[in-house]
């Protein structure tokens, strides 16, 4: 293997490693985004339940 072939091989190796790192980082970012989405959805459901409870309490107070 001559010098230019070695350089080409190492360049290809470096490119493959960089692509794998980028792919891994994108997967991690996607996981973080999904987790944040789920957290916001859970918080929204909790707020919705509290508002419904408050609404029911007001209705009960008015109907008594």
Image (tube, rainbow, N blue to C red):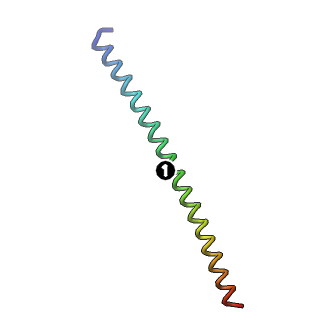
Horizontal relation, residue 1 to residue 56: left or right: left
Which residue shows up at 37% across the image and 24% down it? 14
Quarter location, residue 7: top left
Estimate the x, y position of residue 6 in percent, counting from the top left.
33, 14
When the figure is inspected, residue 58 is found, relative to residue 33, above or below; the finding is: below
Which residue shows up at 35% across the image and 23% down it? 12
Crowding near the residue tagged with mark 1, few <14, some 14–19, many ≥20 C-alpha atoms within 10 Å = few
When the figure is inspected, residue 24 is found, relative to residue 43, above or below; the finding is: above
Quarter location, residue 1: top left
When the figure is inspected, residue 46 is found, relative to residue 64, above or below; the finding is: above
Horizontal relation, residue 19 to residue 35: left or right: left
Of all residues shown, which one is farthest toward the right? 64
Per the image, label 1 sits on a secondary structure element best described as helix
Estimate the x, y position of residue 37 in percent, counting from the top left.
52, 56
Query: Between residues 12 and 35, which one lies in front from this camera angle?
Result: 35
When the figure is inspected, residue 40 is found, relative to residue 12, above or below; the finding is: below
**Which residue is the site of mark 1?**
33
Horizontal relation, residue 61 to residue 44: left or right: right
Query: Between residues 1 and 58, which one lies in front from this camera angle?
Result: 58
Estimate the x, y position of residue 25 in percent, counting from the top left.
45, 38
Which residue shows up at 41% across the image and 36% down it? 22
């Amino acid at each position: 293997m001559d010098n230019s072939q070695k350089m080409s091989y190492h360049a290809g190796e470096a490119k493959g490693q960089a692509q794998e790192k980028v792919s891994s980082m994108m997967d991690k970012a996607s996981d973080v985004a999904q987790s944040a989405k789920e957290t916001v959805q859970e918080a929204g459901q909790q707020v919705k339940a509290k508002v419904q409870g408050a609404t029911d309490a007001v209705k009960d107070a008015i109907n008594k």
